[in-house]
Image (cartoon, coloured by chain):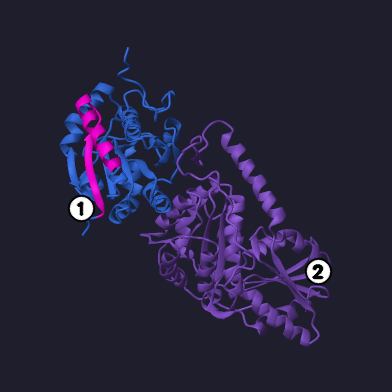
Amino acid sequence: MNRIFQRPASLLDRPTHFCPGCTHGIAHRLIAEAIDELGIRERTIGIPGVGCCVFLYHYFPIDVLEAPHGRAPACATGMKRAQPDKIIFAYQGDGDMAAIGTSEVIHAANRGENVTVFYINNSVYGMTGGQMAPTTLLGQQTTTSPYGRDFKSEGYPIRMAEMLATLEGVCYSTRVALHTPRHVNQARKAVIKALEMQNAEMGFSVVEMLSTCNTNWRVTPLEAIDMIENEMIPYYPLGVFKERTGKDFL
Amino acid sequence: MDRRLTKGNIALAEGAIQAHCRYYFGYPITPQNDIPEYLSRNLPKVGGVFIPAESEIASINMVMGAAASGKRAMTSSSGPGISLMQEALSYMAGSDIPCVVVNIMRSGPGLGGIAPTQGDYSQAVHGGGHGDYHSIVLAPASVQEMFDLTIKAFELADTYRNPAMIIADAMIGQFQEPCRLTPREPVVVPDKPWALTGCKGRAPQLLKSLYLADGEQEAHNLVMKQKYDIIRDREVMYETRHLEDAELMIVAFGTPARIAKTAIENLRARGIRAGLLRPISLFPFPVHQVHDFSIRIKKILVVEMNTGQMLRDVQISAHRDSRIFFYGRPGGGVPYPDDIEAQVVAALEEA
């Protein structure tokens, strides 16, 4: 009998710490599949941020550096400059990348650092209990926006993929979602493309993944899937915002 | 030995290159700008990497990435920038990642001024960042030591897999002296089997500082303490001058120690027997040396360019019967030799 589906070699067989219904696990699997497909596990180094993403090393049989909160793109910069032959990826949540780490990611992108950032946007600080993030949707209730996010006080949700796409150093910026099989397949292609472009030394690549946090959204996993479709995607449109076709630097 | 008239900051930067440091990341701040300027010119010539980072936070985290790769990496800054680096310094201490950080101090608090000062002693020696850790801290007092102690800092950082800091004031950084710009001994960079280089042919490796399971963090802290105890045991560096017959011991580091040497010569010409103990390593502090000399030399004068930071370490170290005096010039004030002489005379006159 032919085996047609199995756990990727780059994903360890471990009980997950993620909540039931969370899509971090899907993101992990997609990255592991891409590492397998490109045959790069032994020269890939992962750098998770702080938050639910931090336990990356628990799931991936690769070298891992744990970065301070928001600083993974700076750590990735130092590591890639020291080891240009390695594949370096950061794995950050929206609290990590779109709040405390905006400076580091913008400047790593602007320098065209040849690294990849996988950016999990679930619109809240997950690990600390669902506080409001810069990505929280207008009107969304969180533990620190109990009356719903109000633009008059908290401003508007920040669209990182679009913003990073404006920078010359970026070779690939896309937003995908992880809530249906069709979207997961699109995400899978984006993850592979980002790592391929790093392999081809084309510059900074970022894949934003709209992700569920049903626990902190206070909804069921199925309701969370609906919220991605009906609330997140209308504000955070899916698509490719930048894609270089060659090393066409200015 | 061939010596060249060299500026302190340049000697330090050349020391880094001679120590096989090939990765520098930094952000401009006075009075240390000669260091990044020199390295931006000279690192590319030896295949190194210089990145003008967007902030001191980014600088030190780039250092972390390069150092985690097993390479010698460094940054330099001054007061406000060093404050911004404390988070990552704590992470590196907690993750056993070696690095060298240079602080050419400016006075503070806040933006402060750029005249010679030693206001960052406590930050460097007694933590700075969060958590239960120490950086190794060296304090040069000459241009030659800027060169030699930079090489030493890389060596100590690698040996103990720990951040090492060099703290110097603007006087040491900015003045020029004849300096030998070749290492005293051949520089050897040790193997770093712990480095993150991709897991080809070996098990995956991890550098982290998160310990959540019951008892894990405590166990890790105790292992770190063992390391610090070994450092305290083996790595104390200090210099003495005229302590054999001294009736008063001046304790000073950096620029005030140099000024104290002039004061001591002047005093001795007047028949007043003063001597000097100059800590070169501030962590580890020469605790036993201060104690042992203080058994015989009852009076101690601590001279610093702050309001009394190393003073606490001298008070802890000295014999319980010691009489400890303090003379400090904070905020960019530099003592003159006759100021120190007057303090010595007054201390000796006290019953």
Q: Residues within 10 Å of mark 2 (few under 14, many from 20)?
A: some
Residue A189: percent from the left, percent from the top?
A: 24, 34
Q: Alpha-carbon distance for marks 2 and 1?
A: 69 Å
Question: For this rendering, which residue is in front, B252 or A218?
Answer: B252
Residue A188 is inside the magenta segment: yes
Disc 2: which chain?
A: B
Quarter residue B186 falls in = bottom right
Question: Residue at the location (38% across, 44% down)?
Answer: A88
Q: Which residue is mark 2?
A: B298
B37 vs B259, left or right, is left
The chain carrying label 1 is A
Residue A155: horizontal and vertical position, in percent?
A: 23, 47
Which range of residues does the magenta coloring cover? A169-196
Query: Judging from the image, what is the letter of the chain drawn in purple?
Result: B
Instruction: State the image coordinates of residue B160 (x, y, percent, origin top left).
Output: 61, 51
Q: Label 1, on which residue? A: A166
